[in-house]
Every structure is written in structure tokens, then in C-alpha cells.
Image: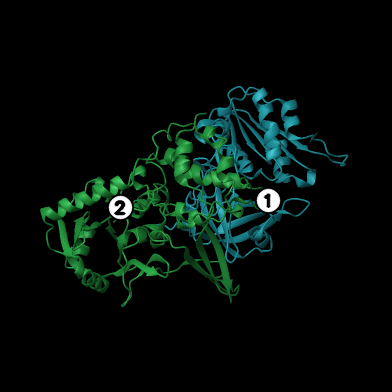
Chain colours: A cyan, B green
Amino acid sequence: MQNPYLPYPVRIDTITVETEDRNLKTFKFVFLNPEDEKRFTYKAGQFAELSVTGKGEIPIGIASSPTEKGYLLFTVNKVGVVTTALHQMSPGDIMGVRGPLGNWYPWEILEGRNVVIVGGGFAFTTLRSSIVYMLHPDNRKRFGDITVIYGARTPGMLLYKEELMAWERRDDIKMHITVDATKDPSWKYHVGFVPTVTKDTAPSSENAYALVCGPPIMIKFTLPVLTGLGFPPERIITSLEMRMKCGIGMCGRCNIGTEYVCKDGPVFTLAQLSQLPAEY
Amino acid sequence: MYVNPADGIPRMAKRAFKKAALIDVLNRLKERYRLYAPVRQNDMTNYQELASGDQADFSASNTRLSPKSFMHPQSLCMFAFGTDKGSDQAGILREVEKDLPRSVVFGIRPCDSKAFQLVDVNFNTPEYQDPWWIRRRQSTTLVGMACNSPCSTCFCTSVGSGPFSPDGLDVLLTDLGDDVVAEVMTAWGSEVLDHADIRGRATDAMTEKATALQQEAERSLGSLLPTESLREKNLNALFNAPFWDDVQFACINCGVCTFVCPTCWCFDVQDEVRNQQGVRVRNWDACMYPLFTHHGSGHNPRHQKLQRVRQRFMHKLKYFVDKYDRGVACVGCGRCVQQCPVNIDIRQLFRLMNDFKG
């Protein structure tokens, strides 16, 4: 019997500072044991528990795509004990990854559909995983139009800037990058909040699903916009965060009504959430 | 044992022994098993390992603490690690060996054994199996003691159990005064009785007396609490019901209800380090505490007392019911009723929730 609480040991390969406030770093992990990498088969939208011995574990969405072999990426915001310790670690250090955990974006259903991705701030990690996954040459033809609306407070707070620019140059993905405000005269993308840009760019809801991740305030104002564009609640999909410990539906803290966010989620449709208490 | 008799293991013949021989029975079991039984500790009774000289005490209807720590210890050392960065083992966890000899819990009440079956659905799932819960379940034989005189706070018959219910037990003992009848439920139970050298057959008179005691005990529990409508109630309507404000008013969020409850299983995981040697431990936790759901960002979905009180009762009487379709997550032991410092009574919640119109 495999112990579901025991992390796989990994080595930190590289650490990339993502944002101008230096509060977000992307960690690239390589498995110490090749067989662990085989066991860690994941889908875009899942998360893992990052384990730092002596500090504890934190649930973080997987930012790499299943199509990226040989490593895992996690983008971590520095907020508490474990994330602070993680931010102080160096390439070469050994730590643990436990997972993959939770459900994923419904790739079986999304096949043959147009996909609209709406992201805000640092909640863009599993959306990055999804975009990289869909853009992979083996997968791109399995999906229709891909539209991305992604916003941050300032240009310096956008994650994965080089990739965003590379996607801008492609013709098989429609990018709408926005910032709340900027004084940079060379900024040539949108300025404005994500809900407004969503409304202005008005992605079609025809045969489309929307994947929405962001801070609660962005979600709150984006959902009515998507509804106005004709997206039914069954085709608006979001991913939730909760305080977690076990990540496998046992420790009891991350429930919303009958559902454990760690095991039954973190991905839910708006239709599912409407059946549950608004306690998140 | 880890098998429900209802799942196909036939009931075996009833045996019996003289109550005066109980001390010999326990001594024989001690030679074979790690033996636990209720023991009087000042003004309360709790389970403890029976060392020589300890006297088991079956006079209390319920122990102060439930026996859940046999399967789910209050504090469990999961893993150990070193933090010396120079070591090639730095950052790597290894499982701490668990001392799990074959054990017998002697004198457990039927409500408490039923609780293990309910909590199994949390720790032993199709997707994940909690190794420590399962190993403990598999190494522990449960010898139950029927309740001849349930407490005034007991309501086991309302929640699918009963003072003589064999659910989850390997043996059910009934104290007839001079004799004790032992009904074997599983092969493990049979083995324990063999090792205790309990081989005499119960007479028809004994069985009749046991049945009479059962009827008297069940009758003493009075009318049943309403549970039949909990399943069909709208979850969000119950969640938003106005009565939560009254229910939570006196609660001081002390969490004693969760700690004494045999079906409360929530836990926390913490790392502790001393002199470069660390352990990852899990400790009982409780939905009564704000930190239980406090995000790193500062956001807390259950930051109000009302939300936490509602969570506990909704979990027991609605979420669990809807999710697993095996009744409420309550076995009617009454410990939370007895020990709540502000007299919040879960029996009132059965009525409020089951009879809620809205």
C-alpha cells in the first residue's frame, strides 16, 4: 500500500523571480527517483502539496504542463511559513512533492470546443499549464479557438512574461493582456480590469467553455459578464483555493458543503457551485 | 474486526462464562494481546492499557473520552527527518515505525464500535487509503459490552445503533449479573474467546434473560429522534436556516464536543524540529477553531462562530448523510451533550434540522 502522505523527494533545479515585487517565484523541480516521475502523472488543473521538512506542506497548483517532460513547475506567492521558507531555498536543495492531487479541467469535454481562459494576478498557474497543454503540436488541433484574457495590476506583476509575448506572436491563440494601470508609454496592450476587458473583447460563447481563475473580486465581476455573453453555468469552470492539510479528503477542513475542495475539486463548474453553500 | 457481520459472516453460537472469572479472562488475554479496557480514573472512566494490578471497570455507561484514539491517536508521529543540510538525507522524510501488536479493546460500547464503521468511509476510500487508520483497524479486535442501562443522554437507537447492537464488534458480551453471555460475530472474536478459554455454551435461559435486558434497555431510551427527512431537505435551505443564530449563541468554541466525539476525525499536520531532528505529526483538530480554515492570505471562509457551529452540525446531520448515504455521522453516545459547557444539545439539532420547513 502506497502511503498517500509521503512526498516524492525532488531537487530544486532553477528558481525564477516572476514579478517586480519579487513575491512570486517559479520553482522548477526534478524528481530524485525516475520511477517517481512516472507515478506523478497529472493533468492540467491539478495541484500538489509542496513539502519543506521542518516547516510543513502547502497546496499549490501545478504550473507546468503534462506535455513538459522531466520536470515540474510551481509558482509560489510568499505569504506564510512554508512559502517564506521555500523562497529562501536555493537550487540544489532537496524537498518534497506530494501528488498529483484533486481533479482537473475537463479535458475530455473541452475537446472540439472553443476555450476562453480568463485569469487574474497570480492565479494564472494552472491556466498556464492548460495553455501550454493545448498549444502542444499533438493537441492544438483537438481544440477550437483559444482566447486568453489575462490581467495583473501592473506590467511587472504579470507572470510568465516571455511566454505571454511568444503567445502574442502566434496566430492560433488570441491574447488579451491587460494591466489595471501603467505609466509605461511603450505598453501596447490593454489597460483596464479583467471584467471590463472581457466585456469589451466579448469572446463568443458559441460552442465555448470559459476557464476562470483569479482573485475573488475579479471572479465576482467576471461571472456576470460571461453570463451576459451567453455562457451557461455548466460551461463556466473555476478552480478554488482552501486551507488544506492532507490534500486527499481526510483531514476535514476544506469542505464546501458535501464537497472537499482538495479531492472533489479544486475544479468546479458554476452550476455545481450554485448547489453548494456559498462558504468559500 | 474490519468486517461487518451484515456483510455475510454468519453469527456463531453464543458462549458464556461466570462473571466471577472475568479477572482470569482478562489475565489470559493479556498474555496474548495488548489489552485495553475501561479503567476508573478519579472522577471519570477511560480506556487504558490494562497493566498488572489495574482493575477494569464496566460500570460507566460511557467512558469520558471515546475510544477513537485506538484507531486515530490524538497525536501521531507520521514521518521523521533530519534538517542537517550537509546530510544526503536532508529534506527526505522516512516513515516512523509504528508499534502495532495484536490488540483487544475489551468492553467497548456498541455506539463506539459503530463509530469506527462510520469513520471508515473517511479513511478508507476507493481513491486513497490512510495506512495508519487501516493498520490499527486490522490489528484490533473489539470485544463489546452491551449497555444494560443507557444514560439519560444516550440516543443510539435513533441513529441506527442500539445498546445491544453488534455493528462493528467481533464479540458482544451481555452482563447477566452472575453470568456473561458472549456472542461471537467474527472469526477474530472466536479466536479471542478461545484464547480467553471461554468455551461454555450459553443456556436458553441465559439467552432469554439477555433478550429481556435488551428490550428493557431499548425501551428505556424512549421515543426516537426524527431523522427521516434529513436526506431530502434542501442543503442550501438548511444552511441558510434562521435557527443557526440561536443554536450558536451560547457556544464558546471550546471544541470539547469534537474531542469527545467518536465520529469527529478532523486532524492537523505539523512539523516539529529539535536539534536538527524533526518529525511530521498529525494531531486532532476541530472545526470549532478559526485557524482550522484560515488561509495564508488572511481570508477565512468560516471566520464567524456561527459558521463554525453550523459546519459541525451540518457535517454530522446533512453533508455526511448526503455524501455517503449511510445515515448521520452520529452514534448517539451523548458525550457532547454531557460535556458541552453551555448545554448545546445535538438532539435539539436533529429536531430543528429534520423538521425545518423552508
Q: What residue do we see at 45% from left, 68% from top?
A: B96
**Helix, strand or loop for disc 2:** loop
Q: Which residue is mark 1?
A: B297
Image location (x, y in percent) of residue A124? 66, 43
Left or right, B330 with reference to B24: right
Eyeballing the image, is A205 above or below A276? above
Instruction: Establish whether labels 1 and 2 are both on one chain.
Output: yes
Asked whether A236 or B285 is in front, the reply is: B285
Determine the image quadrant of residue A200. top right
- For marks 1 and 2 on the same chain, the one whose residue lies earlier in the sequence: 2
Q: Which residue is mark 2?
A: B168
Image location (x, y in percent) of residue B43? 42, 67
Eyeballing the image, is B336 above or below A221? below
Asked whether A240 or B325 is in front, the reply is: B325
Q: Work out which quarter of the rendered image holds the N terminus of chain B and state it.
A: bottom left
Image location (x, y in percent) of residue A158? 74, 44
Chain of the residue displaying label 1: B
Would residue A164 be seen by someone viewing this image from the given angle? Answer: yes
Q: Amino acid at mark 2?
A: Gly
Chain of the residue displaying label 2: B
